[in-house]
Image (spheres, rainbow, N blue to C red):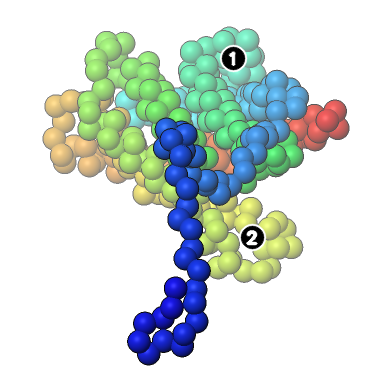
């Protein structure tokens, strides 16, 4: 065709319209999409049963080593608070039983309760590490701090710890008559444990740089901070522990009577709780980590 007025006189052929058939209307082509390719998920599951067994063995080793001392100190603090025995007399009696009749001590319910708390705590931490190494294709011995590990171990430790405290209060309270633990006691025990866990996980990285470099001649500042922080917080958390026990031991006591009772037992009980915290959050954690690493390294050699 020719351009209209003002055109350049060039004739252009009419472009043909795309043909439409009945088949194309009835069976339209699906739209094309540029979807990214999918890849199969790969997990490091080799020798997984052996790795799970290593987690349990290392947790059992750590719990078995620290549980006797923690059992002795926990019983001493509670018997002293209830008036059934002095702190030193309770501790010395328990030590004599452990040394003279270890089978009786190790089969006792208090020891089994303490062992269960720390075995479950260490096993939870180990399991989180194994899950992480499995899903991220990392070596079996790989460990990494994480919020999931912190919250999981804290939940397990606090839940079982509260149950243990309630049972110890009933076993070593002022009488053999069992009564329910007041809700306020549970709240104080939970606050006590929260303070200890916070001091064990969050404070050491902040405290270590503040320590003198002279400490490095004896031990690392990080290791010393890991011992000092949870021990020091017992100065503030032990009164909460004693107050919670007194609410159970003496339901009708006045505020002033409780204050005098807690103040009278504060120094000795704080020292005892410092003595049981260092093994629980220091030595036990080191043993668990070292045993697990060696077992996992032997498992890796099989891969």
Left or right position of 244 against 300: left
Q: Which residue is mark 1?
A: 106
Looking at the picture, how far across and down is residue 75, in whole percent?
A: 45, 25
Residue 245 showing in the rendered view: yes
Please state the horizontal and vertical placement of residue 127, each as a whole percent of the image.
59, 30
Answer left or right for 270 relative to 121.
Answer: left
Residue at 70% from the left image edge and 39% from the top image edge = 137
Other-residue count near label 1 (Cα within 10 Å), few / some / many at <14 / 14–19 / ≥20: some
From what the image shows, is residue 161 above or below residue 103? below
Identify the image quadrant of the N terminus. bottom left
Q: In percent of the image, x 63 and y 10: which residue is there?
A: 103
Residue position for label 2: 221
Q: Position of residue 210 (x, y in %)?
A: 55, 68
Q: Distance from label 1 to label 2 (Cα)? A: 35 Å
Q: 23 or 170: which is nearer to us? A: 23
Q: Secondary structure at mark 1?
A: helix
Please report contact status of discs 1 and 2: CB closer than 8 Å, yes or no: no
In the rendered view, does 277 fall on the left or right side of 178? right
């Amino acid at each position: 065709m020719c351009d209209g007025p003002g055109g350049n006189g060039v004739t252009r052929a009419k472009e043909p319209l795309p043909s439409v058939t009945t088949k194309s209307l009835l069976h339209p082509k699906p739209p094309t999409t540029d979807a990214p390719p999918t890849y199969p998920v790969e997990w490091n599951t080799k020798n997984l049963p052996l790795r799970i067994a290593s987690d349990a063995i290392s947790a059992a080793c750590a719990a078995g080593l620290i549980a006797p001392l923690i059992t002795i100190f926990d019983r001493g603090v509670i018997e002293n608070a209830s008036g059934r025995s002095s702190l030193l007399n309770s501790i010395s009696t328990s030590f004599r039983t452990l040394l003279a009749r270890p089978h009786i001590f190790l089969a006792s319910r208090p020891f089994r309760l303490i062992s269960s708390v720390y075995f479950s705590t260490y096993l939870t931490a180990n399991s989180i590490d194994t899950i992480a190494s499995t899903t991220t294709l990392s070596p079996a011995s790989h460990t990494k701090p994480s919020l999931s590990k912190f919250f999981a171990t804290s939940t397990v430790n606090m839940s079982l710890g509260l149950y243990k405290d309630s049972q110890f209060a009933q076993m070593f309270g002022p009488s053999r008559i069992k009564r329910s633990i007041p809700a306020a006691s549970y709240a104080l025990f939970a606050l006590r444990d929260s303070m200890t866990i916070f001091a064990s996980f969050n404070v050491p990285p902040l405290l270590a740089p503040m320590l003198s470099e002279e400490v490095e001649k004896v031990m690392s500042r990080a290791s010393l901070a890991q011992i000092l922080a949870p021990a020091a917080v017992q100065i503030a958390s032990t009164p909460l522990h004693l107050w919670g026990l007194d609410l159970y031991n003496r339901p009708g006591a006045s505020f002033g009577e409780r204050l005098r009772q807690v103040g009278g037992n504060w120094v000795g009980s704080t020292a005892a709780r410092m003595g049981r915290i260092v093994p629980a959050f220091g030595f036990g954690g080191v043993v668990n980590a070292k045993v697990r690493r060696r077992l996992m390294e032997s498992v890796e050699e099989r891969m």
